[in-house]
Amino acid sequence: MFRYYYLKYSLLLIMLASTFAYSHPHSFITLKTSFYIQNDQLSRLHLVWTMDELTSSYLQIEYQQNPTQTLTDLVNNIAENNIFSEFSIMTNGKKLPIEITLQKEEAALTFNNHKATVDFWLNLKHPLPISNSKFELMTYEKTFYVDMYYEQDSDITINHNNCKIIIDKPKPSDEILNYAQALDENETAIETDSFVLGKIFSQKVLVSCK
């Protein structure tokens, strides 16, 4: 996709990898997501993204020089890229997108144990009743230069006893695996309407409520 040297504060561009590395991905972000229910309606999501040490080291250099601008540009980049996510609800057998807005004033960037963490809130434009509802969330970087993933099931929570969460793990074919492994750092994966490499490797968060 993009690279750090072309656009300074872009989320993807600060995720540099060793020039000796081959195969995608080259950078990693671990995810945590909390779904918040109020009055039996899904209204907000809290996202926490933690970057690998190498990526974090570059970001920290920028942050030390200008913390406010670094956070602003980082959050703007996330928002402009649709949170690197697809969020939808199943209605009458069809998957319909859910409109969400990043609350920029609530975002924060911290550094701990050599890793950078950005956390932020998403508000649903229209809160949705959870009764007999099914939701799906996928988070990925399209080219798979960056791998965005949940380390364990407990990294996803919801504050309602009538809802359960399942992580549907990706099952790429051997052909797709070989293709990703053959890409080096300077190559960009092909992308078509039916082929998005990052999406193929992304986990699906499935939320179903009674």
Image: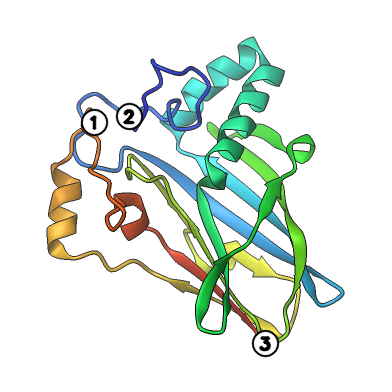
SS at circle 2: loop
| Amino acid, disc 1 | Glu
Local packing at callout 2 (Cα closer than 10 Å; few below 14, some 14-19, many 20+) is some
Q: Earlier in the sequence, mark 2 or mark 3?
A: 2
- Residue linked to disc 2: 17
Give amino acid for label 3. Asn
Quarter of the figure with residue 210: bottom right
x, y (%) of residue 201? 33, 58
Q: Circle 3 is placed at which residue position?
A: 132
Coordinates of residue 41 in the picture (x, y in percent): 79, 73
The residue indicated by pointer 1 is 185
Question: Is residue 91 at least partly visible in the picture?
Answer: yes
Q: Position of residue 92 (x, y in %)?
A: 56, 84
> Which circle's residue, 1 or 3, is located before the other in the chain?
3
Question: What secondary structure is marked by label 1?
Answer: loop
Q: Are marks 1 and 2 in contact (CB under 8 Å)?
A: yes
The amino acid sitting under disc 2 is: Ala
> Where 14 falls versus 200 (above or below)?
above
Q: Are marks 1 and 3 in contact (CB under 8 Å)?
A: no
Q: Which quadrant holds residue 104?
A: top right
* Sequence order check, earlier mark of 1 and 2: 2
Residues at marks 1 and 2, CA–CA distance in whole angstroms: 8 Å
Give x and y (percent) for residue 188: 25, 35
Which element carries disc 3, helix, strand or loop?
Answer: loop
